[in-house]
């Protein structure tokens, strides 16, 4: 059975103190409330705090993801962080393809494909984000867009083993940080469509096991409804993951 997964994408939020105290408190609550590991909880803090975060979470059921990696392996790329650097501090999950990286840092599908290849080479699990803009949905192009995003990136992977390293996150851009969530039906329809694309390309077995998460204005009030849909295997959470009480409610949903 697929595990339900909740991922906190903290983006460029939380400094050293906020990061470490959040994680210590979360661990304490997990322990006290005996929150079991049938659910997988992943936190994606900023680069400078991944190392200390990993030390804090050692031996717990919580794990970490980086928010990005460089598409180059190593060398003269000022300001970048490589997959091998992250592996050397024990990080082996990464978020790629987030719409904010596509929009503000010009990450194209070509660049993302390079990042995927490097990530897989270093054994990373990849949380890969796809999703349409408001205008594309208005024009009813959301299915075409999502298909194209996959065809130009993830679908270049040929082996089933590689595909087993992916978690897909459907994040409609119009829902990110806007307080406007996709309805459970809209999200379920898209998730089922995404799964069908994987089934067509890679077969039932690997595709039924793949976790497809929803992201975009998830909060403590709408999470339960979204997560109860058949093809929604959890969430990628931005704003509501920054406060421990809200995030806990989402985990418990
Ligand atoms: P919000 O939950 O703030 O809408 O952000 C979603 C997101 O972008 C997660 O990656």
Image (tube, rainbow, N blue to C red):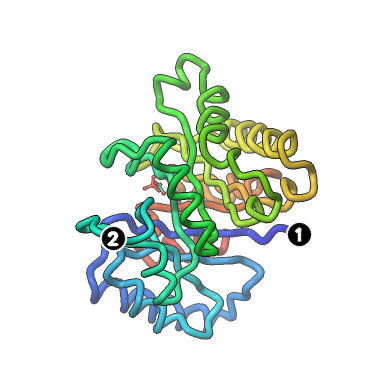
Q: Residue 1: which disc?
A: 1
Q: Is residue 171 above or below residue 44?
A: above
The residue under the point 72% across, 46% down is 207
The one nearer the camera, 209 or 92, is 92
Q: Residue furthest front?
A: 75
Q: Return the x and y of residue 140 as percentages of the image width and height.
A: 52, 17
**Residue 19's quadrant in the figure?**
bottom left
- The residue at the point 23 percent across, 69 percent down is 15
Report the mark closest to the observer, 2 or 1.
Answer: 2
- Residue 101: percent from left, percent from top: 33, 43
Residue sitting nearer the eye, 109 or 146 = 109
Which quadrant of the rendered structure holds the N terminus?
bottom right
Taking the spot 27% from the left edge, 70% from the top edge, the residue there is 48
Total labels: the figure holds 2
Secondary structure state at the residue bearing disc 2: loop
Dot 2 crowding, Cα within 10 Å, few <14, some 14–19, many 20+: few
Q: On screen, 42 above or below 201?
A: below
Report, in whole angstroms, how far the alpha carbon at label 2 lies from the one at label 1.
Answer: 42 Å
Q: Does dot 1 land on a helix, a strand or a loop?
A: loop
At 58% from the left edge and 39% from the top edge, which residue is drawn?
Answer: 156
State whether label 2 is within 8 Å of ligand 1: no
Residue at mark 2: 75
Residue 243, position as x, y percentages in the image: 35, 63
Q: In this view, does 76 lie to the left or right of 234?
A: left
Q: Which of the marked residues, 2 or 1, is nearer the chain's N terminus? A: 1
Q: In the current view of this chain or complex, which residue is farthest to the top?
A: 139
């Amino acid at each position: 059975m697929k595990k339900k997964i909740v991922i906190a994408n903290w983006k460029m939020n939380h400094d050293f103190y906020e990061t470490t105290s959040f994680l210590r408190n979360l661990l304490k609550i997990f322990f006290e409330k005996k929150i079991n590991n049938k659910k997988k909880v992943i936190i994606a803090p900023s680069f400078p705090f991944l190392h200390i975060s990993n030390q804090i979470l050692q031996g717990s059921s919580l794990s970490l993801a980086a928010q990005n990696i460089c598409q180059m392996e190593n060398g003269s790329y000022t300001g970048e962080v490589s997959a091998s650097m992250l592996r050397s501090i024990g990080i082996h999950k990464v978020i790629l393809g987030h719409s904010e990286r596509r929009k503000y840092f010009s990450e194209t599908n070509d660049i993302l494909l390079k990042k995927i290849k490097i990530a897989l080479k270093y054994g990373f699990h990849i949380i890969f984000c796809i999703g349409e803009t408001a205008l594309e949905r208005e024009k009813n192009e959301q299915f075409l867009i999502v298909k194209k995003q996959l065809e130009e990136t993830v679908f270049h992977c040929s082996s089933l083993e590689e595909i087993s390293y992916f978690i897909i996150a459907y994040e409609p851009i119009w829902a990110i940080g806007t307080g406007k969530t996709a309805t459970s039906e809209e999200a379920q329809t898209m998730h089922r469509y995404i799964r069908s694309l994987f089934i067509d390309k890679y077969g039932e077995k690997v595709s039924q096991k793949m976790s497809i998460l929803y992201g975009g204005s998830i909060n403590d009030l709408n999470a339960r409804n979204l997560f109860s849909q058949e093809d929604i295997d959890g969430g990628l959470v931005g704003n509501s993951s920054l406060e421990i009480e809200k995030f806990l409610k989402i985990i418990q949903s």
